[in-house]
Amino acid sequence: MFDIEVISLFIYAVLAGNAATTAFFRIPRNIPINGWKIVGGKKPHCSNCGHLLRFWEYLPVLSWIFTKWRCSYCGSKTDIAYPILEIGSVVIIFVLYMFLGFGERIVINFLFFAALLLNTMLFVRHKRIFLKSMAIMLSSIIVNLVYEVDCDRWICLFK
């Protein structure tokens, strides 16, 4: 069972880290995070030349190996923030796993720490706080609070 837990946590963290890299690039540029069908959105692309990424170029972690840290079209280096966000997400989830074990609680707490990592990286890079990234973090805090509320100790309006 341990192996399935570790593999599933790794996949979850890497995908969340990949989503964080998308947010890291798009939030400061006011590009919609979901760029597939929203007006003004854009499919995953090289941040330097705009080349649309092929499927294997967008795979978390593996894309660095396949492309040797460079855009396969223009040759520009991958921003160091991307692997920091993806690897940082993996480190966060395994630290939480050591303290919380496997279950829904790790997923809910991970949302907060991944959002904190994203906000930290955005602040370090741009020296400002972005409302959209703070909304992501606030949402994770609300999810954590709602999860932690015990209806037996509080007056529940929906009983």
Image: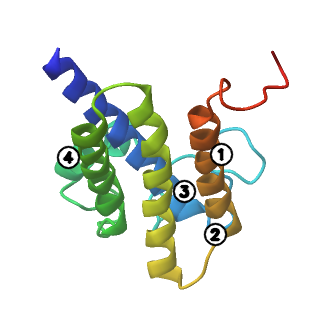
Which type of secondary structure does the marked residue at label 2 adopt?
loop
Which type of secondary structure does the marked residue at label 3 adopt?
helix
Quick check: 148 left or right of 82? right
Which type of secondary structure does the marked residue at label 1 adopt?
helix
- For image coordinates 34% across by 40% down, the residue present is 13
**Cα–Cα gap, marks 4 and 2:** 27 Å
Q: Which residue is mark 2?
A: 29
The amino acid type, in three-letter code, at marker 2 is Arg
- For image coordinates 71% across by 38% down, the residue present is 37
Q: Position of residue 135 (x, y in %)?
A: 68, 57
Q: Position of residue 51 (x, y in %)?
A: 46, 56
Q: Residues within 10 Å of mark 4 (few under 14, many from 20)?
A: few
**Cα–Cα gap, marks 1 and 3:** 20 Å
- For image coordinates 81% across by 15% down, the residue present is 159
Q: Is residue 105 visible?
A: yes
Query: Looking at the image, is mark 1 or mark 3 earlier in the sequence?
Result: 3
Q: Which residue is mark 1?
A: 142
